[in-house]
Image (cartoon, coloured by chain):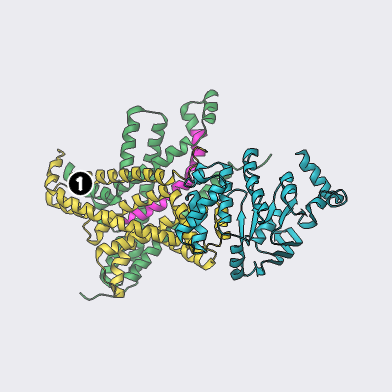
């Protein structure tokens, strides 16, 4: 019953490849989630009742259905529609849609927290709605929402492990292969667990730093 | 093998899968509650070393993928400890531990939300730490925790879908089976999705009702 | 010319403005006085289109603020300065000022920036041009707000209690700039509590009471015993203000 982690050493290169795939998938999915989240958040705060309802339905649906079910729906379903995309793209797509649902809640809170007077100043200057959103509303909302968006990103990283079920050899997928190759699943999965936890810890720290940096001009500092 | 159509028996299959999902969810929620609240109580009594260890393990469980935790228990434990673990056992162990970790954090935060002045007043009146816990802290902490707890349980229900990967015949696994047989992914996964959705909504609704009932006692009724 | 005819505004069950008629000619400085809740700010917010009218008509240079396309034109001709400044917190002073000229008037960036810095210099903030609002005092923020409104080269300046959130020293800073603008011939519509200031620079004073415009007189006539003061409510209001 000895814990021998050295057997993992020859496989580190292979595991690193898996980690790289995880990083790529999560990076792309983050961008996808932010874009989806921003669009849906704007829809949920729009004056059109219909738009608000559609956006709400989307968020409600994708937050109350398990991710693996969503993933299978797209992975097995899209070919039926004649859409043939590979596992990586399907995974990123699925993560973006699910992540977007969570991100939209966060961004929506950020939008609603903006001082309405600022929007009024923009309106009265004659700025178009589009310009107001892209130059005023979103920049401010995103700055104040960095921490909760960081949580969404961390969640994305953990959820990406599920992509291993659609034959994608990201970190968890490669770990499974190494586990069966070495016949040492306990060692492999314990290390994997710690690696994911360490990864999310580092991301949380970076998010904290990013929050400080982006918000240092917004916080009332010394008055001249 | 030619694909086959849906049969009425498939409804039975779905019901069985749903039953396994719900049964496992309820069991692991219960165990998770016992462990999580138990650990939070231990922390309330401020036992030194244990708190650090518990914090470390809960942070590890909270910040790693549940799928990996499942693999560790299902594949890792038998290889390392030379014991037999069935898929259902592995699922119960993993989900209970994972749920317990999150409940621990919620419970700790709920207990700490109770103002110190109340606790001090109670102690000054001669109540023991246990009596304070039981009569002053527990009722208020519970009311406080229902909201976060409901959110957590809705999430944990989704997470149970992962036990299908290690072979448990839950709702998702049945979905896989039906999908492979009928090759109608849209229908199969839409139905499975709707079933999970309805269960999630049920939990959320129950949570709101429970919270209203618990908070009714603390509502200000006027002089 | 700004023309308000039979303006009516209702919030829920409360009629905040009723049958208000007001004309502001180019070059005039008009001050709107009244107690809290008399509808002063609401009137300004109707002129710049932040509130929709429930009755009557407001035109800015013949553009009807009730019609969206015409409102856009009306807004190009008027600039608003707010009581709580409403500066964009994520942009520097210069960026705050140049945003609308670049986006709405399509001015080239370099040109807009130079003008912005000149404006800031003229109000004494030349060295704070690249500061963020969080690094500026209240008086400084309001001065940036004034520059931001002026950058659009508006015909009419609308000022909604712009010194109410400032302490006496900062109030003086801002009032000096406004006095200069008035002397230069800028058309201004003020809502303010600063009686002395209003008396000094206004051409006309208008008094609102519970949503109705009850007095509209040239300044000296307003403060005369047989003019504005003849109205008991005005007299009461003025004596209260003096006591404060």
Callout 1: SS: helix
Q: In the image, which lettered chain appears cyan?
A: C
Q: Which of A175 and C85 is in front in this view?
A: C85
Q: In which image quadrant can residue B7 be found?
A: bottom left
The percent coordinates of residue C174 (x first, y second) are 62, 45
Q: For the point 76% across and 43% down, which residue is it?
A: C241
Is residue C142 toward the left or the right of residue B173 in the image?
Answer: right
Q: For the point 54% across and 27% down, which residue is it?
A: B122
Q: What stretch is highlighted in magenta?
A: B134-161
Q: For the point 46% across and 56% down, which residue is it?
A: A138
The percent coordinates of residue C215 (x first, y second) are 81, 55
Q: For the point 43% across and 59% down, which residue is it?
A: A38
The percent coordinates of residue C173 (x first, y second) are 62, 42
Is residue A127 toward the left or the right of residue A26 in the image?
Answer: right
Q: Colour of chain B?
A: green
Residue to which mark 1 is pinned: B76
The percent coordinates of residue C197 (x first, y second) are 71, 46
Is residue A161 toward the left or the right of residue C117 in the image?
Answer: left
Q: What chain does mark 1 sit on? A: B
| Residue closest to the far front | C184
- Mark 1 is surrounded, within 10 Å at the Cα level, by few (under 14), some (14 to 19) or many (20 or more) other residues, namely many
Residue B143 in view here: no
Q: In which image quadrant can residue A170 be found?
A: bottom left
Instruction: In the rendered view, tell whether residue B48 sits above or below residue B78.
Output: above
| Total marks in image | 1
Q: Dominant secondary structure of the magenta stretch?
A: helix
Q: Colour of chain A?
A: yellow
Looking at the figure, which quarter contains the C terminus of chain B?
top right
Question: Does residue C53 show up magenta in the picture?
Answer: no
Looking at the figure, which quarter contains the N terminus of chain B?
bottom left
């Amino acid at each position: 019953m000895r814990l021998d982690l050295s057997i993992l050493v020859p496989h580190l290169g292979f595991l690193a490849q898996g980690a790289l795939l995880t990083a790529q998938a999560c990076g792309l999915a983050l961008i996808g989630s932010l874009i989806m989240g921003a669009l849906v958040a704007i829809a949920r705060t729009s004056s059109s009742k219909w738009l608000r309802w559609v956006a709400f339905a989307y968020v409600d649906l994708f937050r109350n259905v398990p991710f693996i079910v969503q993933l299978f729906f797209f992975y097995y379903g899209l070919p039926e529609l004649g859409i043939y995309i590979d596992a990586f793209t399907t995974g990123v797509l699925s993560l973006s849609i699910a992540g977007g649902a969570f991100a939209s809640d966060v961004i929506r809170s950020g939008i609603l927290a903006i001082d309405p007077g600022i929007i009024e100043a923009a309106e009265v200057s004659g700025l178009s709605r589009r310009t107001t959103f892209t130059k005023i509303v979103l920049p401010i909302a995103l700055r104040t929402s960095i921490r909760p968006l960081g949580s969404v990103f961390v969640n994305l990283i953990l959820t990406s492990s599920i992509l291993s079920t659609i034959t994608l050899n990201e970190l968890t997928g490669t770990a499974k292969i190494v586990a069966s190759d070495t016949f040492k699943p306990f060692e492999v999965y314990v290390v994997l667990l710690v690696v994911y936890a360490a990864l999310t810890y580092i991301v949380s720290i970076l998010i904290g730093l990013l929050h400080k940096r982006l918000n240092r001009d917004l916080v009332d500092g010394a008055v001249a | 093998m030619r694909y086959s159509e849906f049969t009425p028996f498939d409804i039975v299959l779905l019901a069985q899968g749903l039953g396994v999902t719900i049964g496992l969810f309820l069991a692991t929620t219960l165990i998770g509650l016992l462990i999580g609240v138990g650990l939070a109580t231990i922390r309330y009594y401020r036992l030194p070393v244990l708190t650090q260890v518990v914090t470390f393990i809960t942070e590890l469980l909270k910040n790693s993928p549940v799928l990996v935790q499942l693999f560790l228990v299902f594949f890792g434990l038998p290889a390392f400890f030379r014991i037999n673990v069935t898929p259902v056992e592995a699922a119960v162990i993993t989900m209970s531990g994972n749920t317990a970790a999150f409940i621990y954090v919620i419970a700790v935060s709920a207990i700490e939300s109770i103002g110190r002045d109340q606790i001090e007043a109670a102690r000054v009146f001669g109540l023991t730490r246990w009596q304070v816990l039981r009569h002053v802290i527990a009722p208020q902490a519970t009311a406080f925790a229902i909201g976060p707890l409901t959110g957590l349980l809705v999430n944990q229900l989704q997470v149970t879908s992962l036990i299908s990967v290690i072979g448990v015949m839950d709702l998702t696994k049945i979905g896989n089976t039906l999908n492979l047989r009928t090759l109608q992914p849209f229908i199969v996964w839409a139905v499975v999705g709707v079933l999970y959705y309805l269960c999630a909504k049920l939990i959320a609704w129950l949570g709101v009702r429970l919270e209203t009932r618990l908070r009714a006692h603390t509502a200000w009724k006027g002089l | 010319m700004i023309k308000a005819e039979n303006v009516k505004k209702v919030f829920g069950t409360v009629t905040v403005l009723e049958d208000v008629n007001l004309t502001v000619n180019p070059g005039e400085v008009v001050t709107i006085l009244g107690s809290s809740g008399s509808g002063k700010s609401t009137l300004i917010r109707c002129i710049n289109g932040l509130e929709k009218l429930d009755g009557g008509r407001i035109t800015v240079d013949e553009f009807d603020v009730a019609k969206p396309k015409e409102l856009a034109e009306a807004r190009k001709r008027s600039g608003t300065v707010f009581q709580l400044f409403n500066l964009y917190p994520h942009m520097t002073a210069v960026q705050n000022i140049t945003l609308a000229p670049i986006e709405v008037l399509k001015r080239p960036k370099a040109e807009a920036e130079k003008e912005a810095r000149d404006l800031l210099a003229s109000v004494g903030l030349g060295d704070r041009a690249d500061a963020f609002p969080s690094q500026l005092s209240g008086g400084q923020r309001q001065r940036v707000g004034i520059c931001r409104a002026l950058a659009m080269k508006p015909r009419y300046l609308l000022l909604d209690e712009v010194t109410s959130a400032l302490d006496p020293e900062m109030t003086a800073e801002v009032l000096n700039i406004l006095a200069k603008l008035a002397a230069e011939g800028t058309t201004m519509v003020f809502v303010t509590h600063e009686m002395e200031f209003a008396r000094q620079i206004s051409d006309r004073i208008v008094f609102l009471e519970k949503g109705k415009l009850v007095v509209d007189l040239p300044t000296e006539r307003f403060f005369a015993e047989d003019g504005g003061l003849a109205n008991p409510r005005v007299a009461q209001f003025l004596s209260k203000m003096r006591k404060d």
